[in-house]
Image (tube, rainbow, N blue to C red):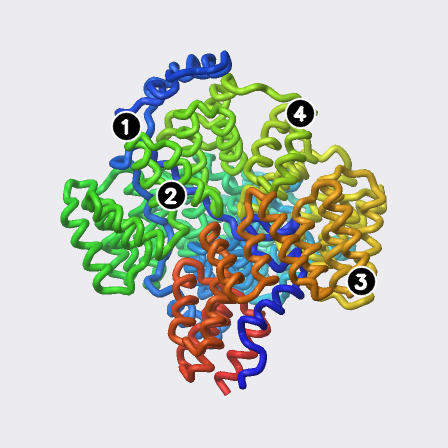
Amino acid sequence: MRGLKLAERFKSTQVHALSSSSSETNGGNSSKASVAATKPRSNNLNRNKTMLPSWSKTKSSTSNNNNAASAFANLVPLHLPSTDTIEPSIEPHLKPINLVETLSELYQRLECCSHSNKALVCVEQYSLLRGIGDQKVLRRCLRTACQNAEDLLSKVVLSAWLRFERRDDELVGVSSMDCGGYALECPKKNLEQGFSPCSVNDHCQCLQEANQEACTESACVSDEESDILFCVGSEEIGCVRCRIAALSDPFNAMLYGGFAESKMRKIDFSGNGICPKGMRAVEFYSRTKRLDLFCPMTVLELLSFANRFCCEEMKSSCDAHLASIVDNVEDALMLIEYGLEERATLVVGACLQVLLRELPNSLYNPKVAKLFCSYEAKERLANVGCASFLLYYFLSQVAMEESMVSKTTMMLLERMEECATERWQKALSFHQLGCVLLERKEYKDSQCCFEAAVEEGHVYSLAGVARTKHKQGQPYSAYKLISSLIFEYKPSGWMYQERALYNMGKEKCFDLDVATELDPSLSFPYKYRALAKVEEKQIKEGIIELDKFIGFKLYPDCLELRAWLYVALEDYDSAVRDIRAMLTIEPNYITSHGKIKGEYLLQLLNRGVQQKSQADCWMQLYQQWSCVDDIGSLAIIHQMLENEPGKSLLEFRQSLLLLRLNCQKAAMRSLRLARNHSSSMQERLIYEGWILYDTGNREEALARADRSIEIQRSFEAFFLKAYVLADTSLDPESSSYVIQLLKEALKCPSDGLRKGQALNNLGSIYVDCGKLELAKECYKNALAIRHTRAHQGLARVYHQKNQRKAAYDEMTKLIEKAESNASAYEKRSEYCDREMAKADLDVATQLDPLRTYPYRYRAAVMMDEQKETEAVEELTKAIKFKPDMQMLHLRAAFYESMGDLSSAVQDCQAALCLDPNHASTLDLYRRIQN
């Protein structure tokens, strides 16, 4: 007997999990969740002969529609894209043919590599995982690399990279050179050579050290009598012979060796490149070893003097002193020239640190671009050990995010390729350069770069080769190339998607259908099928096709396309909703192949819809929130922010919705705006707390919440503290404290939307503590103020009471009310028999194919039925387009039970590459190895 069946164990695990963490959301039950952000695809909409105005001039039943039609008459040059003109972009990152195998090999190297190489291996890990888009995983890779960095340049680059990933440059009042309180990213610590062991959460002591240095700098100045004069021009500088001689071997030889100067009391030192003021500084330094009393120009003169006369100690002191005073871009641009000329590594490193921590803004400075972009500039940096693949990799990624077609981006990628030494570095450099050249329409050069990447082992670059051949009028050659790829390797969705571009008719549609089946996260097939319906005058069917994708993944270009289709139907309210949601995700979005700003399009569309007051917006927000219409809620909040720009409370609500919709980058941007626009310190501390929590700084988030409560008791401060404390395994004492915090939150003023969430969270804690009646009361109260998601918590209560039918019925109510209900189908499957559960989970997969629980459940059922091969295949199917840690762990366990230990080890290693601290996977991995 196998004991409790796998499928039942899955149900049990799901039922007993916290409602705030038990579901992976497109929706979800928690108002805060760190979810993977997805970078918006670039807009590739081109022109077509079908003009929008021809649709908008059909019957209009209201004056508003007539106004809108008139407004759109101004858009005559704009056209809806056709199926012949749209195409997907080539993804500008490494995309291994077999990601699991590649991650497994990487994990093996991480386990056994030397400490000096670990930082670079972590950067390789970062580059491989960029395609997954999980910001937490990527941030952990960079942090681990930063922890293991030994050389000055790597520390400077990696700490600046971490800062850029958090977009700290967008925080008002925060200097780029602020320490931030953590040793790992302290600008001062970065300039210390060698490995400095510290954990992610180690606090920096730089402020205390600075105070101690200030106290020790009051050392006594030596009063030794001068016994030699150095004449510089008409001035004589008295010096102590032994002190000057101690500066370097050449001075010692001159003053005590067989040279004539050894017997002189007066030495003419004119013509040696130092002024009288500088020589007095040399004399003072020779006695005191201090530089803090001199201006930077004098120290620069001393640096040059030290280089000329081999005064190594003086050079190091000057180098360190100048490095310590660089704190803005202007100083950095001036001092780096001196540093490069005098080969002062610390000065150059300090200047680079300022410039890198000011990214992306500093890249728009022509002097900064000149410093990095040319081959000669790179060679100058290399002469002082400050040019590396890592430096140019970071610069290139920043430049690509800013503009894929700029000359700066192209030149930085060229420098990156010149610095590449390992195969993966060369493959990445050539592939990204190929992507940029493709966007710049330089097809022949782009093809050469993609081919070079293929030679370095990056098979995905063949898609770039095919695309450039197609652009150069060789569609059949492109078709054959991708067909051979499909024949040679295990097929992936992107292969069929790419071949569809070079196919026609039914074969094209077949390839796109297969692409969707293999990888439903690809947006292009949905867009193509939608436009194909439109060209057949089936606009509503085209919208339905786009709905399928937008229902689980928000891309701005898909929202824009759906908006245009709504315009064609003269449904301007829906069009405005989609454009507002689009601008929330990407505020600077440019529509219709770069021809019109999204904001301007919104202004035009607004002429066709009824304008709402702020009070009307609040009422509609409650309605949208209660029916779990997250996109509609986003649109309403966007309009409310249009009415009240800079309203921090609304920007915070916006961030909560974006997190629920898996748009983490946009969510963090909204959270930063809320922090910047906060009207009081008490409010600012709350938003800073959420930012710190979402970036992994749990203790600092709690400290912010405590400080906010000290200033003023508020709902959001208590809620923040309770949420952060609850995000761990709670013991009875901790649970009681969280309950008390949520009760305190509910006593404070707030609106029903937030109080509903607090009641929902409170009910969840009560269920965990076994206080079912109190939990039921909380969920009922939440439902009374239209917090629809409380149905899920109430179902959990009924299940705990062994009332499965009541639990099932409660989830059915949620399904009926919610616009986004994939998670509701998933949860309802826990409260019914196996066949009904399977049906619900099939619906959940159809609505949101990126949810992993249905695949895991179905695979567990197959294992219970002794269908081992089918069970593994069910997981493999999903892992191909979503390499999820839990699915890899489960497949490893299946392989172990089947006796395929090598495959089990490979899956464990790949899973640990995603989460090295996952306890269950670590246990399984050690057990298999033993």
Asked whether 738 or 802 is in front, the reply is: 802
Asked whether 690 or 404 is in front, the reply is: 690
Mark whose residue sits in front, 3 or 4: 3
Taking the image as shown, residue 25 lies to the left or right of residue 53, namely: right
Q: Distance between the residues labelled 3 and 4?
A: 39 Å
Q: Distance between the residues labelled 1 and 4?
A: 39 Å
Give me the residue at 44% from left, 15% from top.
60
- For numbered disc 4, what is the local secondary structure? helix
Q: As displayed, is residue 84 above or below residue 829?
A: above
Whichever of callouts 1 and 4 sits on the residue coming sooner in the sequence is 1
Question: Crowding near pointer 4: few (<14 within 10 Å), some, many (20+)?
Answer: few
Q: What residue type is labelled 4?
A: Asp
Q: How far apart are marks 2 and 1 (CA)?
A: 39 Å
Q: As displayed, is residue 577 above or below residue 306?
A: above
Mark whose residue sits in front, 1 or 3: 3
* Residue at the spot of label 4: 616
Q: What residue type is labelled 1?
A: Asn
Q: Do the residues labelled 1 and 3 touch (CB within 8 Å)?
A: no
Taking the image as shown, residue 512 lies to the left or right of residue 570, namely: left
* Residue at the spot of label 3: 771
Whichever of callouts 1 and 3 sits on the residue coming sooner in the sequence is 1
Estimate the x, y position of residue 887 in percent, counting from the top left.
Answer: 48, 67
Mark whose residue sits in front, 2 or 1: 1
> Does residue 577 show up?
yes
Give me the residue at 37% from left, 36% from top.
542
- For numbered disc 3, what is the local secondary structure? loop
Whichever of callouts 3 and 2 sits on the residue coming sooner in the sequence is 2
Question: Crowding near pointer 1: few (<14 within 10 Å), some, many (20+)?
Answer: some
* Residue at the spot of label 1: 48
Asked whether 349 or 758 is in front, the reply is: 758
Mark number, residue 373: 2
Question: Crowding near pointer 3: few (<14 within 10 Å), some, many (20+)?
Answer: some
